[in-house]
Amino acid sequence: MKFIVHDEPALRADSNYISRVDLAPFGFPDLVEQVWLRQEDTGVFVICCIPFRVYGLALRDRVRTTSDGSLVSEVVERSGRRVLRVLFVAGWGSELPAGAERIESLVRELGLLYEWSGDRHIAIDVPAGADVEGLIGAIRQEERSAGAEWEWADVEPFSR
C-alpha cells in the first residue's frame, strides 16, 4: 500500500490526529491519503489539510472515522469550502514549469491556503464566496498550453 502524505498541512497547528482515506473508490487502488484532523467531539473530527486526491472532502469539513480511527468513514457536515486541484504536466523530467510559479503567486495574492504534493500537484482551498475567476482563467491558460490539468475535488461525492 502506498501513502499520499501532507508534509505541510494547511492547519497543522489545529490538528491533533491523523487518519487515512482509502483512495480505491476514486480509482487509485492500493493507495491511501493520510489526512490531518482535529477532534471536535467523540467520533467527530475536522479536516485540517487540503485533500490532494480524495473527492468530496475539503478543509474544515466535519467527518467521522471508523471505530478504530484508522479511516475516515463519512462526512458529517460540509464546511462550504471547495478544493481546486492542479497538476502541472509540462516539463516532466525538468525543473518546475513557469506556469506553476505563476499559479502559486496568484494563489498567494488572493490569500488562499494551499498545499503541494511533490512539486507538480497543488491543492488550493477556496472558501465560500471567494472570487477565483482570475485564478481559474490563469489555470485554463496553462491547460490550453498543455501545461496543466485541473479539477474541482467535489466533482464526485465522498465514498468509503
Image: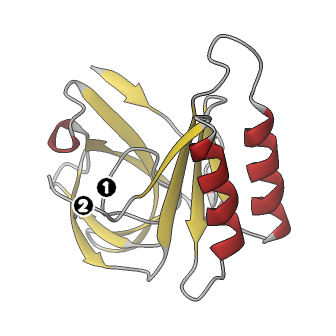
Q: What is the total number of numbered labels drawn onto the structure image?
A: 2
Q: Residue furthest bottom?
A: 129
Q: Amino acid at mark 2?
A: Glu
Residue 43, percent across and down?
Answer: 26, 68
Residue at 71% in and 71% down: 134
Residue 147 occupies quadrant:
top right
Can residue 77 be spotted in the picture? Answer: yes
| Residue 62 as seen in the image, left or right of residue 6 | left
Are the residues tagged 2 and 1 within 8 Å (C-beta)? Answer: yes
Left or right: where 102 falls relative to 30: right
State the image quarter where residue 70 is shown.
top left
Q: Which residue is mark 2?
A: 156
Say if residue 59 shows up in the picture.
no
- Choose between 3 and 98: the one closer to the eye: 98
Q: Any mark on residue 55, and which?
A: 1
In depth, the one of 123 and 89 nearer the eye is 89
> Going 23% across and 61% down the picture, which residue do you hit?
158
Q: Is residue 33 above or below residue 103?
A: above
Instruction: Determine the residue positioned at 60% across, 58% down.
Output: 124
Q: Earlier in the sequence, mark 2 or mark 1?
A: 1
In the image, farthest residue toward the front? 144
Residue 58: x and y, percent? 43, 66
Say what secondary structure mark 2 lies in: loop
For the residue pair 11 and 137, the one nearer the viewer reads as 137
Spatial CA distance of label 2 from label 1 is 6 Å
Task: Specify whether 41 is left or right of 94.
Answer: left
Looking at the image, residue 131 lies above or below residue 1: below
On residue 122, the disc is: none
Question: Does 92 sit above or below residue 129?
Answer: above
The three-letter amino acid code for the residue at tag 1 is: Tyr
